[in-house]
Image (cartoon, rainbow, N blue to C red):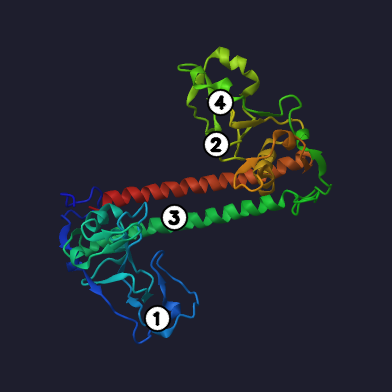
Amino acid sequence: MTDKKKPAIRFKGFTDDWEQRKFGDIWKNTSNKNKNLDYNENDIISVANMKFKNVQNNTSEDYLKTYNILKYGDIAFEGNKSKDFSYGRFVLNNIGTGIVSHVFITFEPIQKIGIDFMRYYINYEGIMKHILVKSTTKTIMMTTLIVSDIKKQNLLIPDLYEQEEIGLLLTKIDNSITLHQKELEILKEMKKGLLQKLFPDGENTVPRIRFAGFTDDWEQRKLNYLLDSDEGLRRGPFGSALKKEFFVSDEEFVVYEQQNAIYDRYTTRYNISKEKFYELKKFHIKPGDFIMSGAGTIGRISLVPSGIKPGVFNQALIRLRINHSITDSMYFLHFLKSEETQRRLTSRNPGSAMVNLVPISELKEWTISVPKKTEQTYIGQLIEKIENSITLHQRELDILKDMKKALLQKMFV
């Protein structure tokens, strides 16, 4: 435990030290069995996510009698270890009285507590790991709680009024996180559905949904038709052309790698000389090009943005350069990302689990259905609008999660 007795951030009006209490002064171990079958299968609680399971498993009455009753405000110890909970974790029941498997050790509060505050506090690894390390035993995957030891451990707890203020704030943030997550999932499903319906599937020559005013069949073309006639499709140079011995420091010319396509970011690790850049000039990338990962994590696509450093791409990347007079960039980007295209891009070697990219020669000769550029633009703009909304919601979600993490660190002792 820390020597501090006050958190770094507090609500106005609260100045007293938090009180040191024994775990056993706040919680007592319970073993209230469901022996009278007051609760049935509909009342089984999943401790992992604190929800009623609502699954009919035809559990026998004799087995239901072995379940422990977990009342509102009680806590249960889950011994599964994870990257977030190295000694297991406590979970507080804030959904209503139900029953949990007898494998969980349960406790009920001895005194009045702020339910929302304690839900976060008792589950917070930053505090609980320091007492659980002293009161658990480990196996490979699980930890076992030693009740007699946990009761002796010290906790720092604020008074009930401060508990309620902290719990209310954290609950509001969690509700906002949940709302953004739901909106994000809806947008992702919408995008997935549109990608399936805005592009023809199989042998079809028209998509299932279209913009008003477009009725013509899409044209059957080779993929090469959409690309620049001279520099449309090129794989990176052999590794011997870009060995580490050619890398230099303090040069404006860089090497683009697979991570740039996978993460859609254009930071670089390696530089090459001006002479080497011009030697490999046919492998340079420029804004408006597309790069695709061609080894390991294959098929990831990125549209090269403006403002990048001049550079060449290595052997793990494939560059696609479109014919801008007949191909819309956003349309082409989402065509490459579509489920149908991604399925065609990858194939499995017979008898192997290895996923490979189709050969470049075969890729050029793909027969695809292509709309006029005007319809391409409508499709590209719509999907890009949804993608921008997804990015915005993801950014707001990340901000809220970071805010919650910071508050947990600074509002608890």
Residue at the limit of the structure toward the front, as seen here: 351
Assign a secondary structure to mark 1: helix
Q: Earlier in the sequence, mark 4 or mark 2?
A: 2
Residue 19 x %, y %: 16, 59
305 lies left or right of 82: right
Q: Nearer the viewer, residue 84 or 170?
A: 84
Q: State the CA–CA distance, disc 1 to disc 4.
A: 66 Å
Given the image, on which type of amino acid does mark 3 rest?
Ile
Residue at 67% over, 52% down:
194
> Which residue does the numbered mark 1 point to in the structure image?
63
**Point 38% across, 67% down: residue:** 47
Which residue is disc 3 drawn over? Answer: 177
Taking the view exactly as shown, the residue that stands out farthest to the top is: 275
10 or 90: nearer the viewer: 90
For marks 3 and 1, give the one nearer the viewer. Answer: 1
Q: Quadrant of residue 100?
A: bottom left
Residue indicated by mark 4:
307
Measured from the top left, where is residue 269 in percent x and y? 47, 26
Amino acid type assigned to the residue bearing label 1 in the image: Tyr
In the picture of the structure, the residue carrying the numbered disc 2 is 264
Task: Indicate the secondary structure of the residue bearing disc 2.
Answer: loop
Q: Report, in whole angstroms, how far the alpha carbon at label 1 lies from the one at label 2.
A: 53 Å
Give the vertical position of 135 relative to 51 (above or below): above
Amino acid found under the numbered disc labelled 4: Gly
In the image, which is nearer the foreground, mark 1 or mark 4? 1
